[in-house]
Image (cartoon, rainbow, N blue to C red):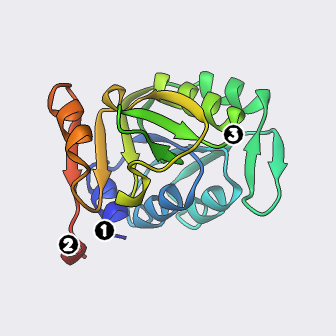
Amino acid sequence: RAIAKHAAKLIPNGSSISLGIGTTPEMVMRALLRHKDLKIYTNNLIIAQTASANSTFEVNCSGGRIRSGDFDMLGSPVESFFSSYMTDFSVFGVGGVDMDGVLLDFDDEEVQIRRVILNNSRESLLVLDHEKFGRSAHVRGGQIQDVSKVICDQKPPNEICKILNDSESELIICEKDEL
C-alpha cells in the first residue's frame, strides 16, 4: 500500500495515465480514487471497474482476449489501443528484475504490451516490491534504467542501485511507516 500511495502522490489531478496489469497497479488505481479529472487507459477489467467509481474520471479499457482469473486483456487489440495514446504517466509492474537490470515477465504478450505502454507515456512509474529483484522469469522486456521512476518498498540489491545511480532513473523507496 505504501508503494501505491507514493505513486498516486506523484500524479496530479487532470493527468492521463496508462495502467498495466498486476496487483500493484490495481492498488495504485485504488490510491488514485480521491483524485479528480483523470483519464485512465487500461487493459485490466478490475482497474477499469475500480476507476469507474470516480465520476470525474474518463475510463478507457482496451479490447482483446480476456485472460480468465486475472481479468487482463491480451492480444494485438491491446497493443493498438495503447499505441493510440500518449499519456502523461504509465504505471506498471513486472514479474521480476534480473541483477543486470533486465525487466522480466512470464508471458510474451504481457511484455509486448508493457513496451507499448512505456513507449507511449511521458513519465513511467515501475511499481514493485523488493521480492521482484532477482526473481526469475523467462521473457525479457526492457531495462530498469529505461523507466523514469522505480518505486519499491525496500532498497534493491547493490547491483540494481548502481544501475539506477548511473542512469537518469529515480529510485523511490517507500517504507511501510509512510502509510
Give the image location of residue 20, x and y in percent: 56, 45
Q: Is residue 139 visible?
A: yes
Answer few, some or many: residues within 10 Å of disc 2's Cα (few below 14, many 20 plus, some between 14 and 19): few
The residues tagged by marks 2 and 1 sit, at their Cα atoms, a distance apart of: 6 Å
Residue under pointer 2: 178
Q: How many marks?
A: 3
Give the image location of residue 75, x and y in percent: 79, 33
The residues tagged by marks 2 and 3 sit, at their Cα atoms, a distance apart of: 33 Å
Q: Counting residues from the N terminus, which is met first, the one under dot 2 or under dot 1?
A: 1
Is label 2 or label 3 in front?
Answer: 3
Task: Choose between 148 and 103: the one closer to the eye.
Answer: 103
Q: Amino acid at mark 1?
A: Ala
Q: Counting residues from the N terminus, which is met first, the one under dot 2 or under dot 3?
A: 3
SS state under label 2: helix
The quadrant where residue 165 appears: top left
Q: Counting residues from the N terminus, which is met first, the one under dot 1 or under dot 3?
A: 1
Give the image location of residue 106, x and y in percent: 65, 43
Q: Amino acid at mark 3?
A: Asp
Please report contact status of discs 2 and 1: CB closer than 8 Å, yes or no: yes
SS state under label 1: helix
Q: Is 169 placed above or below 84 here?
A: below
Give the image location of residue 120, x and y in percent: 49, 24
Q: Residue at x 37, y 70 (%)?
A: 1
Relative to 17, is 99 on the left or the right? left
Task: Choose between 25 and 168: the one closer to the eye.
Answer: 168
Residue under pointer 3: 107
Q: Is residue 12 visible?
A: no
Q: Residue at x 30, y 68 (%)?
A: 2
Residue under pointer 1: 2
Q: Residue at x 20, y 26 (%)?
A: 168
Q: Amino acid at mark 2?
A: Glu
Relative to 28, is 104 on the left or the right? right
